[in-house]
Image (cartoon, rainbow, N blue to C red):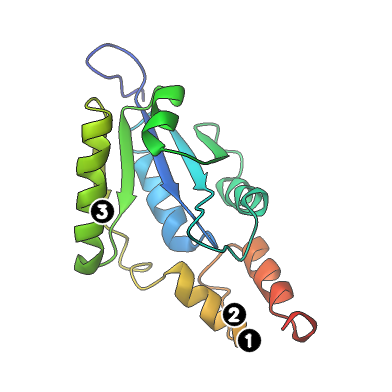
Amino acid sequence: MTHTSRSGAPRIALYAGSFDPFTHGHADIMRRALGFVDSLVVAVAQNINKKPLFSAEERVGFIRETAGAEPRILVRAFDGLLVDLAREMNATMLVRGLRAVSDFEYEYQMALMNRHLHPGLETVFMVPSNETTYISSSMVREVARFGGDISALVHPAVARALTARFAPSHA
């Protein structure tokens, strides 16, 4: 099914984040977003304010592995303003996940700034599924750091990488 815009162009959305690591919660939002767009660009931010556990290239690889052969998903790293990437990719929509009310204020401010910078770009907020609402990247990193079972929280490739990263020789 094609979801064309009023202009007849395919609907392209961006789903951006640091995704450090990419969790089942992120994957849930990614897959459900495909229900209302033709293609989804999963954009891995290279945030200069954060020191990521995994490189942008590693995170891109994890997301590609999680997405599998889905042809409507494009994964790429980016730095700079998200609105610039949206213009480059001809995206008309940003997809943002909201786990809790506490996420809303920041996300709302970002949506308003993005609208100011790119008036044609809409932000769509999605809530996670009941099964993934409690998952956050920071909690996954913490559980992995102390040797907890993360197999129900992330793709197996991510679980292996986290386990290796926090192995005693890396501590």
Give the mark, 1 or 3, whose residue is nearer the N terminus.
3
Q: Which residue is mark 1?
A: 147
Q: Amino acid at mark 3?
A: Glu
- Let me know if residue 103 appears in the view: yes
- Per the image, label 2 sits on a secondary structure element best described as helix
Characterize the local packing of mark 1: few (<14), some (14-19) or many (20 or more) Cα atoms within 10 angstroms: some
Q: Is residue 86 above or below residue 59?
A: above
Residue 125 placed where, x, y %?
A: 24, 49
Residue contact between numbered discs 2 and 1, judged by CB atoms under 8 Å: yes
Characterize the local packing of mark 2: few (<14), some (14-19) or many (20 or more) Cα atoms within 10 angstroms: many
Residue 162: quadrant of the picture: bottom right
Marks 3 and 2 sit apart, C-alpha to C-alpha, by 27 Å
Q: Which residue is mark 3?
A: 107
Residue 165 placed where, x, y %?
A: 71, 73
Label drawn at residue 144: 2
- Per the image, label 1 sits on a secondary structure element best described as loop
- Per the image, label 3 sits on a secondary structure element best described as helix
